[in-house]
Image (cartoon, rainbow, N blue to C red):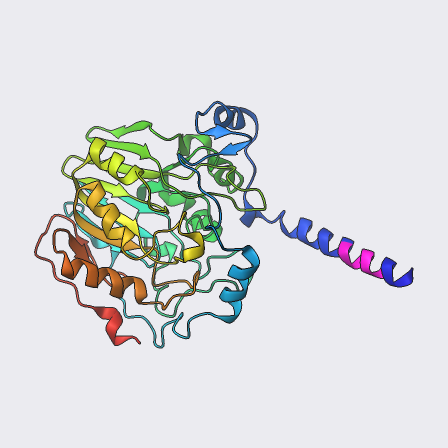
Amino acid sequence: MTILLTILIIILLFILVVVLFMRRPEFGAAPTGARLQRMQASPNYTKGQFQNIHYTPQLAEGHSMLNVLYHFLFKKSKRARPAKRLPSVKTNLSELPLTENMLVWFGHSSYYMQLDGKRFLVDPVLSGSASPIPGGSKSFPGSDIYTVNDFPPLDYLVISHDHYDHLDYKTVVQLKEKVTKVICGLGVGAHLGRWGYSPDQLIELDRNEAANLEPGFTLHTTTARHFSGRSFKRNSTLWLSYVLQTPSLKIFIGGDSGYDTHFAEIGKQFGPFDWAIIENGQYNEAWHYIHMLPGEGLRAAKDLQTKNLLTVHHAKFVLANHDWDEPLRTISEECADDPSIRLATPMIGEPLYLSKEDQVFEKWWEEVG
C-alpha cells in the first residue's frame, strides 16, 4: 500500500507540475467569446476543431508515435546538425531602399519582404529555439545573427499557423511596438491578445477570404494540409497559406503543408505566380500527410504555376531525422534536372531581389559539411 501511495503521489505531482508549466505565457490562450463563436461558425470547423479539406491523419499508415519517437531519439542522422557554423550575411534591413522588391530569409520559415513600398515579416522565430521547453530545439550556430532590434517598423506581420517554429512567443512580444497589423488564421489572435497585441492590430481570417490591405495590396487566404496547436489540444486554431497580390508581384506564401490537390487548385484560381515560397525540410515518411517529401515541393511549385521558387523550413532546427542539408541538395538537383522553374537558394541574410531574373546564388551548404 505504501508503494502504491508513493506512486500515486508522484503521478499527481507530475500532473501538477505539467498543469502549472502549461500556464506559462509561451503556450498562448484558448479562443473564447466572440472569437470562438466566429470559429464555430466557420465551414472549416466541425466536431470541435478545424479540419483539413481531405482526410489527414497525424501519422501515415504503418507508423506509430512510439516508433517515430524511438527513431528521433536513437536513429537520428549523424549529420542532423551542420559540422560548422552556417555562413550568413548581415544585411542592414533599415537601410534597404523601399523602392527595391526584395526578400531576406532568416533560416527555417522566417523571412522579411519589401514589396512595392510595404514591409512584411513572415513567421519570425529569432529567439534561438523552436520549443517552449528550455533547451529544446536549439537553432544552428550562425542561423541567429538577426534580432528584433534589426528590424524597421513593419506594416504587416504574417503568421501561417501557431506552431512554435512559426509563432515564437519571445520574438512576437518583442516585435509588438514595431508592427502595424498582424494577419493570421482564426483563433490565433487569442495567443497574440494574451501577449499584449490590441484587437485593432489583428486581422484574423478564415480560408477563402480576401483582405484588401490597402490600394493595390490584396491578401487571399488559401488552404494548407497541416494542423495546429500549442498545447495538448490539436486544431484549435486555423492554419493557412496565402496569396499576396501587390501592384507588381503575385506571391504564394505556403506555410506548412503536405502535398495535396490544393496546390493545383490554387494555381488554377490565382496563378501564374511570380514567386512561390514552399516548405522543404523537416520531413519524414511517417508524417508525409502534413509535410512534403523530396520531389513533392517541385511538384507543388509546378501545380502553382510559379516562375520562381524559394524553399524554406530548413537550415535552422532539427525537427526530423534527415541530414541538415538534404533538403537543399535534393531540391537543387531536382531543379537542375528540370529548369522550368528558377530556384533561389540565398544564404541566411542574403538579399533576394524579387524583380531581378539574373541573380545567381552559390551552393553555400556544400562548404559547411
The answer to if 36 sits in the magenta stretch is no
> Which of the two residues, 56 or 356, is positioned nearer the viewer here?
56
Residue at the (18%, 46%) spot, across then down: 98
Q: Residue extending furthest right?
A: 1
> Which of the two residues, 150 or 62, is positioned nearer the viewer here?
62
Q: Residue 49: horizontal and vertical position, in percent?
A: 52, 34
- Residue numbers of the magenta segment: 6-11
Q: Residue 125: horizontal and vertical position, in percent?
A: 40, 54
Number of numbered discs:
0
Left or right of 39 on screen, residue 208: left
> Which of the two residues, 81 or 126, is positioned nearer the viewer here?
81
> Which of the two residues, 169 or 42, is positioned nearer the viewer here?
42
Give the main secondary structure of the magenta stretch.
helix
Quarter of the figure with residue 282: bottom left
Q: Residue 136: horizontal and vertical position, in percent?
A: 52, 63
Left or right of 287 on screen, residue 22: right
